[in-house]
Amino acid sequence: MLGCRGNGDVLQVSGTVEIREIRLAPLASGRLARLLKDEGDTVRAGDTVAVLEQPGLRELIQQRRAQALAAAARTAEVEAAVADSQRAANDVARARPLRANGVVSPQQFDNLQSVAAAAAARLQAVRASVRESYAARAALAATEAIKDQLTIIAPADGIILTRYAEAGEALGVGTPVVSLGVVGRPWIRAYVGELDFARVKLGQSVQVRVDGYPDTAFTGRISDIAARAEFTPRAALTERERADLVFAIKVSMDGGDAGGRLKAGVPVTLEIPRLP
């Protein structure tokens, strides 16, 4: 993984192919009911990896769906209630001068007022049911969202690297079920000695060579350079090299996964043109 060499124009650095790892976890607690992918399985973005369940969740969704339907049915009564209330109010308005002239008896007028009051009260109740309908639909949506949060979907193409849970286990929010290796976007981890640190820069083009493809040079770019030096990791080949100060660099590959030929853990050689 280490070792800098090369001629005056090109710096050769040993590195290792790495892949991005994503730990997939549920957004709601539950029991792991089904694990559809196992270690080594290939997955595509959008594939269902695992499904959890919560006791009683299905029944709760059915209950809230019924409540939402009932509330929606009550909202259909609003127009009829408005018409009834308006008609009763108009009857009272027309009867008021007739009562003054003695055409309508006091008892008849009182009956019309009672009908109008009852119609107005019914209208207020129906309007309140509209607000209940909104609340019922929101409660249903929130409960159905929990069901979605219990289903773990692969966010990208890749390979299942590690299984952390078994079917039947109770898992909390954020507890990883599997780890997904995104093999389509490999990158190179390497280290540059302090003497050569000033001769490289972000965005610089790099040639990547692999022993398995001696006649092919893959192209990458330096996407990250560590801001702080560190001592050579223990993977160095000699005791002397372990005492060297180096800077970690990250090389992102151009063109995605280089045809799928760069595998995680494969040693590579980076050829970096030395800057003046």
Image: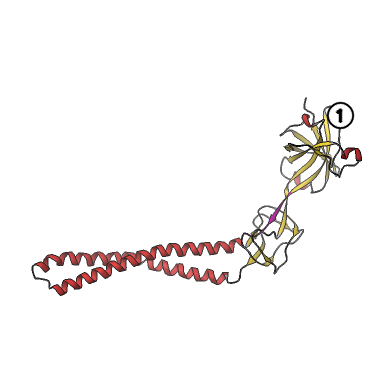
Q: Relative to 92, is 223 above or below?
A: above
Quarter of the image with the C terminus is: top right
Residue found at the very far bottom of the displayed protein: 107
Residue 165's spot in the image, x, y percent? 72, 63
Residue 63 covered by magenta stretch: no
Looking at the rendering, the stretch of residues picked out in magenta corresponds to 20-27
Residue 16's spot in the image, x, y percent? 81, 44
Q: Residue at x 60, y 71 (%)?
A: 55
Compared across the picture, whether 246 is left or right of 27 comes to: right
Amino acid type shown at disc 1: Asn
Q: Nearer the viewer, residue 88 or 174?
A: 174
Q: Nearer the viewer, residue 227 or 81?
A: 227
Q: Which residue in the structure is indicated by mark 1?
A: 7
Q: Relative to 174, is 252 above or below?
A: above
Q: Residue at x 50, y 64 (%)?
A: 140
Residue 36: image quadrant is: bottom right
